[in-house]
Image (spheres, rainbow, N blue to C red):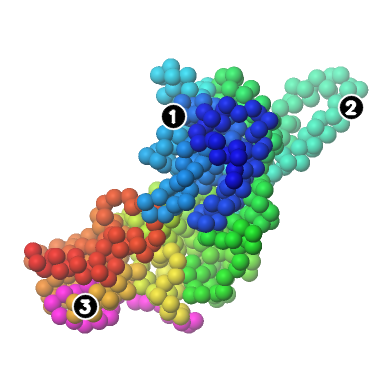
Amino acid sequence: MYPLLDTINYPYQLRELERKALPQLAEELRKFLVESVSKTGGHLSSNLGTVELTIALHYVFNTPHDRLVWDVGHQTYAHKILTGRREGMNKLRMHGGMAGFPRREDSEYDTFGTAHSSTSISAALGMAVASQLEKAGRHVVAIIGDGAMSAGMAFEALNNAGAMDTNLLVILNDNDMSISPPVGALNNYLTSLLTGKAYATARRAGEKVLGLVPSILELANRTQEHVKGMLSPSTLFEEFGFNYIGPIDGHDLNKLVTTLKNLKHLSGPQFLHIVTRKGEGYKAAEDDPILYHGVTKFNPDAGIVPKAPGKPSYTQIFGDWLCDMAALDRRLVGITPAMREGSGLVRFSQEYPDRYFDVGIAEQHAITFAAGLACDGMKPVVAIYSTFLQRAYDQLIHDVAIQNLPVVFAIDRAGLVGADGPTHAGSFDLTYLRCIPNLTVMTPADENECRQMLYTAFQMNTPAAVRYPRGVGTGVVPIKEMKALQIGLGEICREGEKIALLAFGSMLKPCLEAAEELNATVANMRFVKPLDDNLVVFLAANYSLLVTVEENTIMGGAGSAVLESLENRGIITTPVLQLGLPDVFIDQGDPTQMLVDCGRDKDGIVKAIRTKLSE
């Protein structure tokens, strides 16, 4: 079916091919990618854009001895296929199957685990220095996208690498895309290269005119690099100490191979700028690379067919609330670090473009930018995934919480997230949020409560966070009217005997189901901070066992808050069973099955309680 691809299981076999055979391999590899991902789901358009680059890298460099470090990693399917894992593509991102991102334990060719952006240059520099110290003679290559280049960490690494004069190749894969369309001055700067005639034309015109006046021409030559910086990208990276090459066509295999072979023989920091297109070779993905960025199963002949509207997701609930709230309060501004689609801000960006800010892949900047807005009377709402908020923890504490500024954090993807696995799981936010002074932390149990909590957070004059899970909720239709909840007040949803379940957020539903079998009381705690201490004391006084249930790591989470509340009031005899996520990184899989495996479904909760009672 794939005459050439079927003969290539490892890069050493690829390197035995004649160069003229590489375009055929690229064509077969691209077809295999579309066929494979259409059956499993996964990241498609980004992987189609790096087929030629992947082939060229493994063709030129002696992998795995030479190191390839992929940034983010959602463009590494071709890399996986060419490094002995073609058969594993049929269980991509599934439980027990292959991860969707590079992972060191998966293969010696995955030199560094990635999934969050902008880490590649730092990691590759470390490997290059290690090779230098060990005299290992390895080539080290970092492959980074133009979206990831907007993060400060990438420039920190460039600054360090240029000053060290270490042998390192950085490849900028410029496809004018991250996940959402890229933003910012850097992207505008790189985009200007694609009209690269500007510099050449200006230079020729200048030489023609200035040639009439030798003294002026001599002065112009001395300042040429500064003029060049206005019109070409090279000066930016050369000022960091890199030798800049490009831009070149990232889909021209012959040019890629020739350039990479030449770069192998150069010492010091090298920077290669290539231009590619997301979705290359599959027209549907070329036409709509955002739609085909992350896909579920689809028919490759028909393309992705829009599904009939179903239950609204928590993300959609947030997006609708944001627009409704913006209509009521002109001070509201929405901020996202390059996740407009994923965080539900598309409608808001269209209806309120002057109050919508996509700051690029720059989580730290997003939080401090919000703090600055709050200082001068605006009411910023930061839409951010739980896993990405981890990157801005210092800013959350130092710039928002210490100054007690009214910033709302709409935290999506809280808890387990399914196929993206441990790198994207929001397993820790209750733990790392509840220890911060001045911050209110809310956990909605359903869609309506999510909407009301977002409104409650917005009415506060202090920092507040609302964390909600990925996907659809219970199917409850949110009430259009918005009413602020009483801060720190939970509610009893079901009354029973002997056992009290203290449910936080998404765990209310399985707790109610378990309570039917156990005839237990269930409290929807709503707030992790401030905790409803009076409700905790009441339950401790009237029930023989308290059970805390949360979709967060047990350590330091909501259950720990309950224990602290009891201890502060001298209640130390009431048994407490804490149920949450275990102290391990949980691999990818079906979200429902992942909760079952963790014992956080109805049956798991019942089993854990009965085991506790039998002790």
At a point 29% along the width and 50% down the height, the residue shown is 584
Does the magenta run of residues contain 486?
yes
Secondary structure beneath label 2: helix
Q: State which quarter of the image contains the C terminus.
A: bottom left
At a point 64% along the width and 66% down the height, the residue shown is 350
Q: Nearer the viewer, mark 1 or mark 3?
A: 3
Q: Where is residue 476 drawn, in percent x and y? A: 42, 79
Left of 574 or right of it: where is 468? right
At a point 79% along the width and 37% down the height, the residue shown is 198
* Residue hosting label 2: 208
Q: Nearer the viewer, residue 451 or 310?
A: 310
The residues colored magenta run 479-503
Q: Nearer the viewer, mark 2 or mark 3?
A: 3
Does the magenta run of residues contain 105?
no
Q: Given the image, on which type of amino acid does mark 2 rest?
A: Lys
* Residue hosting label 1: 126
Q: Given the image, on which type of amino acid does mark 1 rest?
A: Gly
| Circle 3 crowding by C-alpha within 10 Å: few under 14, some 14–19, many from 20 | few
